[in-house]
Image: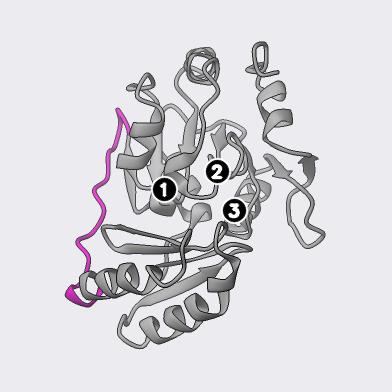
Amino acid sequence: MFLDVDGCLLEHACAPHLARVPPQLPSRLLRLAEELDGALALVSGRSLQSLQALFPECAELCLSGMHGLERRSAHASLRAPAPPESMLELAGEAARFALDYPGACVEAHGPCLNLHWRAAPDAAVAMGAFADAALTRLPGYRQHRGAHGIEIRPDGMDKGRAIAELLALAPFRGRTPVFAGDDPADEPGFAMVNAHGGISVLVGARADSAARHRLDDPAQVRAWLGADAQDH
């Protein structure tokens, strides 16, 4: 089982650091992982540091961060590549640029730069232009545009590849994969799971998704996982 975090397990927040984890969710994830002999992973665009801060109780859970660029696993951990110097410069420029748009948020994690404007919709056009210009200084990078933000990350890595790499490892090897996610960045994961005869679950409503099943929102996901007993 592979689970996205923001918009899937958790409701979207105005900024990533404001996301709320329902108190019963970590223990349920640990129980599910045990029931699956460890074959449960959170597959997220967040960094490992951010995931570990969100779920400090889940120290043994497999985590795939930054779309698979880094991984915490008892079987094969993975460190993210170092960012190029130009990324460090752009992260500083983006942080200063975001000050002009109260509520806008910039996250720089290793080789990835995320621009968020959920709480500052007026920043969308300007941040889009910033991201376009940034790519001219980042060879080998690409951008992913979402409804309320842009992720800039190294080309060639996505959640489909992240899931494929996990499927090659114990305890996931040889099992039918299940993946739930909400964002267009989750589409490669849906395609990979479908190619392995698995179960792909879109959270929310998007007509162009490759997912073959759907749940309305994170509350339904938590109910599906059996983690909603106190979530009312």
Vertical position of residue 157 compared to residue 181: above or below: below
- Quadrant in the rendering for residue 96: bottom left
> Which disc is residue 46 wearing?
1
In percent of width and height, residue 1 lies at: 57, 31
Residue at x-position 54% and y-position 49%:
14
Residue at x-position 39% and y-position 46%:
65
Taking the image as shown, residue 16 lies to the left or right of residue 194, namely left
Residue at x-position 35% and y-position 54%:
69
Disc 3/disc 1 C-alpha distance (Å): 13 Å
**Residue 100 versus residue 203: which sits nearer the camera?**
100
Q: What amino acid type should be assigned to the residue bearing mark 1?
A: Arg
Q: What amino acid type should be assigned to the residue bearing mark 3?
A: Asp
> Which disc is residue 63 wearing?
none
In percent of width and height, residue 47 lies at: 35, 47
Which residue carries the number 3 mark?
A: 186
- Helix, strand or loop under label 2: loop
Which residue carries the number 2 mark?
A: 6
Q: In terms of sequence position, does the residue under pointer 2 or pointer 3 come before the other?
A: 2
Q: What amino acid type should be assigned to the residue bearing mark 2?
A: Asp
Closer mark to the observer between disc 2 and disc 3: 2
Q: In terms of sequence position, does the residue under pointer 3 or pointer 1 come before the other?
A: 1
Q: In terms of sequence position, does the residue under pointer 2 or pointer 1 come before the other?
A: 2
Taking the image as shown, residue 26 lies to the left or right of residue 136, namely right
Residue 215 seen: yes
Vertical position of residue 181 compared to residue 10: above or below: below
Per the rendered image, the range of residues in magenta is 73-87
